[in-house]
């Protein structure tokens, strides 16, 4: 399926994020960090809820043998939200959406808000450039630390020659 | 049969107050926080999420606190809470091949691409009580080693698959949703997808015992732990506004692939077969037991004679759920006064009749059995 979400939003540098990519970064970011970044904006847009934050379940699927037919593993909590803002240039309405793991309504709301503002023709490009690389870096740093600790437990087993 | 009884409201209320007091324990000792359970009782949280069939660390921790550490009770609480939430989505099948590895071991290959990564394991600990833990103290940071790649690793079973020495996993049709026992009651014979769902929610102790029984000769499957891996995977959900699947977060999973010997059949050449285990969180023992039982239950499709309990699909699956099992066992505590009164009357009557010499010995047992 081709969609607008595959389109990279050029930010004048090597850091370009499609909508799908920024939603992934936002969903995996800490809600507190998003809150701080949201409050850093000089004039955050006024928004309306098109769908208030709603918590429910997602049925998690795995694959037999890791690669075969799908089966239902269990469920996880998710929260979704949709907001609307007016574009700062054209005044057209923009929809921001979020589906995030967990039950934090504020997290879902913040992700939807950022998703909306990132699409704003006036505010979007600069905000994307200031927010997304920082969020991605935070996540990468945490992942690298975890991977480095796992890597420190990598072993070499030696098979001893026995009973000559 | 039990009958409804009235009364006892005050006693029940007081019993609940006593439960709350016992749960809290000595008030001079600081109260346990949900965050403490979430951070420091992680494996209990993982088990409750897996068998409660709901991935939410905060809710599982709360359930453990409320249940006073009774994990089967906590699992019940989580299952009950789950029914209050609407199901909003189904995820894309998670890609455990792209897992960010925290632990990954294989008992079949000494040298394998990516190496053996022990991770936070109890293996190789001496199982001696560590009295240092009885005193509070800071824990030093775990060492780090340079990590060149992103922490993902190839699958061990792919090494065998490259030589065609292991059965290929049938791909299945992603367009057709797999069976869901939370929506439709289990039906026998059950297809593998349904069995895996039931096993994933199944009681760890029960699956452990069944898996163990196959090792001891009751339905032997000659297993090797081909690969056990634990780490984080991204979860994707289709979002209508976007028109495609979007990552909504990460969850930790434990996966076990057992590799089992198989002599071959009329249609299949000798090759290795597979047993599969997958759990939420870090539930390694459960994942291994699940893989053993999954393989045992595949006896029919592999043309093996089903002779052992672990190969009896209906027996295994109908008794795997500890919420159902606990409920049915514990319902015996409910009033059975009328049932019991009638049986009591019957025993008394038989005794009387025997005393009066109306029956020959042994006949009483036949009557009671009727």
Image (cartoon, helix red, strand yellow):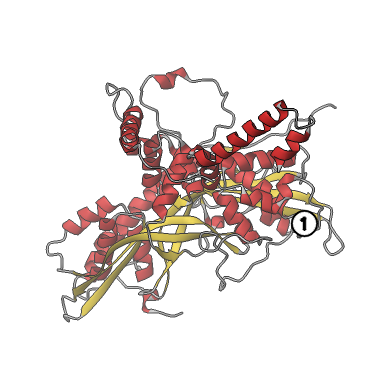
Q: Chain of mark 1?
A: B
Would you say A6 lies left or right of B334 here? left
Q: Residue furthest left?
A: A43
Could you tell me which secondary element the residue under label 1 belongs to? loop
Q: Position of residue A90 (x, y in %)?
A: 17, 81
Count the numbered circles shown: 1
Residue at screen point 63% across, 56% down: B195
Visible residue check, residue B145: no
Vertical placement of residue A85 versus B281, above or below: below
Between A132 and A44, the one nearer to me in the picture: A44
Q: Position of residue A56 (x, y in %)?
A: 37, 60
Between B222 and B198, the one nearer to me in the picture: B198
Residue at screen point 16% across, 57% down: A39
Between B154 and B325, the one nearer to me in the picture: B325
Would you say B176 lies left or right of A135 here? right
Between A70 and B248, the one nearer to me in the picture: A70
Visible residue check, residue B333: yes
Vertical placement of residue B199 versus B285, above or below: below
The residue identified by callout 1 is B165
10 Å neighbourhood of mark 1: few (<14), some, or many (≥20)?
Answer: some
Quarter the C terminus of chain B occupies: top right
Q: Position of residue A129 (x, y in %)?
A: 27, 64
Q: Position of residue B222 (x, y in %)?
A: 77, 44
Q: Residue furthest right?
A: B266
């Amino acid at each position: 399926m081709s969609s607008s979400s595959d389109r990279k939003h050029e930010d004048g540098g090597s850091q370009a994020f499609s909508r799908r990519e920024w939603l992934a970064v936002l969903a995996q970011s800490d809600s507190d960090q998003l809150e701080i970044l949201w409050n850093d904006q000089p004039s955050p847009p006024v928004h309306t809820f098109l769908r208030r934050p709603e918590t429910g379940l997602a049925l998690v699927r795995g694959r037999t043998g890791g690669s075969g037919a799908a089966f239902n593993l269990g469920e996880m909590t998710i929260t979704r939200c949709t907001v609307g803002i007016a574009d700062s240039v054209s005044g057209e309405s923009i929809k921001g959406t979020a589906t995030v793991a967990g039950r934090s309504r504020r997290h879902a709301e913040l992700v939807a808000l950022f998703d909306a503002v990132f699409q704003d023709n006036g505010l979007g490009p600069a905000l994307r450039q200031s927010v997304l690389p920082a969020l991605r870096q935070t996540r990468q740093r945490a992942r690298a630390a975890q991977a480095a600790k796992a890597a420190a437990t990598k072993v070499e087993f030696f098979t001893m020659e026995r009973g000559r | 049969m039990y009958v409804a009884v009235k009364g006892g409201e005050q006693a029940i209320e007081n019993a609940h107050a006593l439960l709350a007091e016992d749960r809290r324990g000595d008030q001079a000792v600081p109260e346990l926080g949900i965050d403490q359970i979430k951070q420091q009782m992680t494996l209990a949280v993982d088990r409750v999420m897996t068998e409660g069939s709901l991935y939410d660390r905060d809710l599982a921790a709360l359930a453990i606190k409320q249940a006073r550490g009774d994990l089967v009770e906590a699992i019940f609480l989580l299952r009950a809470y789950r029914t209050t939430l609407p199901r909003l989505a189904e995820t894309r099948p998670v890609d455990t091949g792209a897992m960010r590895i925290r632990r990954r071991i294989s008992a079949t290959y000494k040298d394998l691409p990516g190496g053996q990564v022990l991770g936070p394991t109890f293996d190789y600990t001496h199982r001696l009580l560590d009295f240092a833990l009885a005193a509070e103290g800071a824990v030093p940071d775990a060492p780090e080693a340079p990590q060149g790649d992103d922490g993902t690793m190839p699958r061990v079973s792919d090494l065998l698959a490259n030589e065609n020495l292991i059965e290929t996993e049938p791909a299945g049709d992603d367009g057709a949703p797999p069976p869901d026992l939370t929506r439709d009651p289990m039906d026998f014979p059950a297809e593998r997808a349904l069995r895996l769902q039931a096993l994933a929610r199944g009681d760890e102790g029960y699956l452990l015992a069944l898996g163990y029984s196959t090792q001891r000769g009751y339905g032997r499957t000659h297993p090797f732990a081909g690969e056990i891996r634990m780490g984080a995977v991204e979860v994707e959900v289709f979002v209508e506004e976007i028109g495609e699947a979007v990552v909504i977060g990460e969850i930790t999973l434990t996966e076990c692939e057992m590799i089992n010997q198989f002599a071959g059949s009329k249609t299949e050449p000798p090759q290795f077969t597979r047993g599969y285990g997958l759990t939420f969180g870090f539930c390694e023992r459960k994942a291994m037991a699940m893989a053993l039982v999954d393989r045992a239950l595949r006896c029919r499709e592999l043309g093996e004679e089903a002779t052992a309990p672990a190969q009896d699909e209906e027996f295994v699956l109908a008794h795997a759920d500890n919420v159902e099992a606990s409920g049915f066992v514990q319902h015996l505590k409910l009033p059975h006064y009328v049932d019991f009164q009638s049986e009591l009357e019957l025993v008394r009557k038989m005794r009387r009749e025997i005393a009066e010499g109306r029956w020959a010995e042994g006949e009483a047992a036949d009557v009671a059995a009727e």
